[in-house]
Amino acid sequence: EVVLTQSPDFQSVTPKEKVTITCRASQSIGSSLHWYQQRPGQSPKLLIKFASQSISGVPSRFSGSGSGTDFTLTINSLEAEDAATYFCHQSSGWYTFGQGTKLEIK
Amino acid sequence: EVQLVESGGGLVQPGGSLRLSCAASGFSLSSFWMHWVRQVPGKGLVWVSRISSDGSSSHYADFVEGRFTISRDNAKNTLDLQMNSLRVDDTAVYYCVRSAPFDFWGQGTLVTVSS
């Protein structure tokens, strides 16, 4: 099983700040890494697919990078509505998720 | 507009059964693999099961193998999850999810297994 480890687990940030969340896979997964946003009380929403591909309707301040075992989700110029938990997910083998990164807006 | 609406959750005793359903609209269900993913409230996401677009192939996470059965009716645009021999640690919100990467999620239905 591919284990995904996200860091940090929690981050408190101010609006307009740049945020970086990392996801490390226990083995190489190529580009089969996706990012989701889950706001409180809502279902997860796909933000980035295959490491760096954008999703229609998702603000351009969200971007992804990486391949192999190390991946990054970047949020440029954070907005209040970005308060959420972010999960990475791999589809290279059987599906697994990272433990989540909770983003708090100060 | 793509919509996935789950139903069938509730309170059940350990060892009991429950059948979850997911009604799909806004797209042709027959074109997509479908999945169930669960989440203990406040915790992480865990993949449970998947079924091929035509229903001929299905797969399960080890912890539900032999207890859960996924099925679909493309004519009715529905996806089901029959859950038997439920355990306390099956308690979670169950999401119906399209494809992989998981591009659309239902709102989830809460399953509580407790005596």
Image (cartoon, coloured by chain):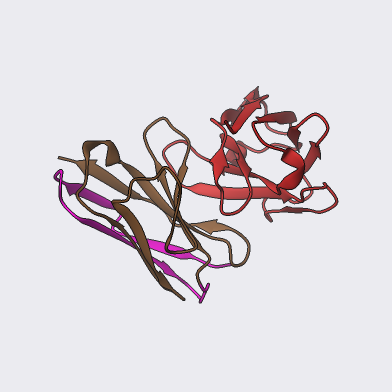
Chain colours: A brown, B red
Specify whether A42 is left or right of B12.
left
Specify whether A33 is left or right of B28.
left
Residue A64 percent location from the top left of the image: 37, 61
- Residue A99 sits in quarter: bottom left
Instruction: Tell me if residue A28 comes above or below residue B78 in the rendering.
Output: below
Residue A4 percent location from the top left of the image: 46, 64
Considering depth in this image, is B11 or A33 the residue closer to the camera?
A33
Q: Is residue A6 magenta?
A: yes
Residue displayed at 37% across by 49% down: A86
Residue B100 percent location from the top left of the image: 60, 53
Considering depth in this image, is B85 or A3 the residue closer to the camera?
A3
**Which quarter of the figure is the C terminus of chain B placed in?**
top right
Residue B42 percent location from the top left of the image: 41, 38
The part of the chain drawn in magenta is A1-30
Specify whether B29 is left or right of A41.
right
Q: Is residue B102 magenta?
A: no
Considering depth in this image, is B92 or A94 the residue closer to the camera?
A94
Instruction: Tell me if residue A48 comes above or below residue A2 in the rendering.
Output: above
State whether residue B113 appears in this view.
no
**Which quarter of the figure is the N terminus of chain B placed in?**
top right
Specify whether A3 is left or right of B48.
left
Residue displayed at 53% across by 66% down: A32
Instruction: Tell me if residue B49 comes above or below residue B92 in the rendering.
Output: below
Residue displayed at 61% across by 42% down: B97
Instruction: Tell me if residue A88 comes above or below residue B72 in the rendering.
Output: below
